[in-house]
């Protein structure tokens, strides 16, 4: 748990949603990444992925600073874009 307070001027929420759809391979996937502050004041990077129309799977990581979480999110989004994920149309 973080002992530092987050200032009101710091962003409180950041998200990215991407889809990868290929009908020839019967592929319809989503990838959602969110940075948010939880009830304990921790900065969390939450990833949710799976087949479109399902709840998918979740993974949550806690970071010490908003910038560290944002850097991790940028790396994850770049990796997914290399694999063919694009923002929904």
Image (spheres, grey):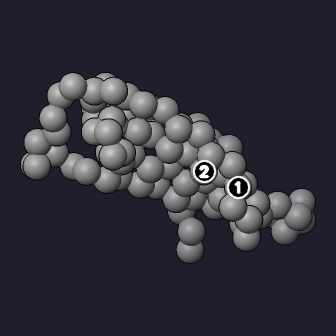
Query: Residue at label 2?
Result: 48
Badge 1: how crowded within 10 Å, few (<14), some, or many (20+)?
Answer: some
Q: Is residue 37 above or below residue 65?
A: below
Query: CB under 8 Å between callouts 1 and 2?
Result: yes
Task: Answer with left or right where residue 21 lies relative to residue 67.
Answer: right
Q: Position of residue 80 (x, y in %)?
A: 61, 44
Image point 73% across, 70% down: which residue? 53
The quarter holding residue 41 reads: top left
Whether residue 59 is visible here, answered yes or no, is yes
Q: Position of residue 7 (x, y in %)?
A: 11, 42
Query: Residue at label 1?
Result: 56
Residue 84 vs residue 2, the one in the foreground: 2
The Cα atoms of the two marked residues, 1 and 2, are separated by: 6 Å
Label 2 residue SS: strand
Image point 17% across, 39% down: which residue? 6
Image point 28% across, 27% down: which residue? 2
């Amino acid at each position: 748990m973080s002992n530092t307070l987050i200032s009101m001027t710091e962003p409180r929420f950041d998200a990215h949603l991407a889809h990868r759809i290929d009908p020839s391979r019967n592929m319809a996937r989503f990838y959602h990444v969110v940075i948010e502050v939880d009830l304990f004041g921790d900065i969390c990077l939450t990833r949710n992925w799976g087949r479109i129309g399902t709840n998918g799977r979740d993974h949550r990581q806690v970071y010490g600073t908003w910038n560290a979480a944002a850097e991790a999110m940028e790396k994850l989004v770049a990796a997914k874009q290399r694999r063919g994920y694009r923002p929904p149309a």
